[in-house]
Image: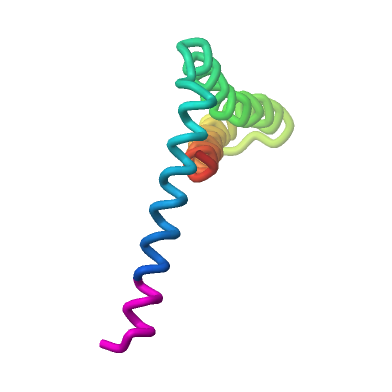
Amino acid sequence: MSDDHRHSQGDESTEEITRKVDRRIKKRREGVPGAWFGLGMFGLIGWAVAVPTLIGIALGLWLDRVAPQPFSWTLALLLAGVVLGVINAWLWIERERRRQ
């Protein structure tokens, strides 16, 4: 192994350690999120699922009245709203997790 290769590996680990130390210092400075923060996050995730579900139901009820079919638009769009809401919540949680 060449000296240059060992040197670059050493630099990478030093940079990684520096990032970890900086993150720990930042967390100590900001403090641990409290119970209200957790409840707020829980509520936000709930709304992220509830809103598309309610929109799907409303649109489905309207379509059932306007364009009746042998299947229920309301049930189909309820399911679609739940799926979209769960995907939306999951993406939001992943974005927040990466940010922290």
Residue at the top extreme, as displayed? 36
Residue 73's spot in the image, x, y percent?
59, 34
Q: Nearer the viewer, residue 7 or 41?
A: 7
What span is colored magenta in the figure? 1-9
Prevailing secondary structure class for the magenta stretch in the rendered image: helix
Q: Quadrant of residue 2?
A: bottom left
Q: Tell me, yes or no, if residue 70 can be seen here.
A: no
Count of numbered labels shown in the rendering: 0
Q: Tell me, yes or no, if residue 23 can be seen here.
A: yes
Residue at horizontal 46%, vertical 11%?
35
Residue at horizontal 38%, vertical 84%?
4
Asked if 61 appears above or below 20 in the picture, the reply is above
Residue at the right extreme, as displayed? 66
Q: Nearer the viewer, residue 12 or 32?
A: 12
Residue at horizontal 41%, vertical 46%?
20
**Quarter the N terminus occupies:** bottom left
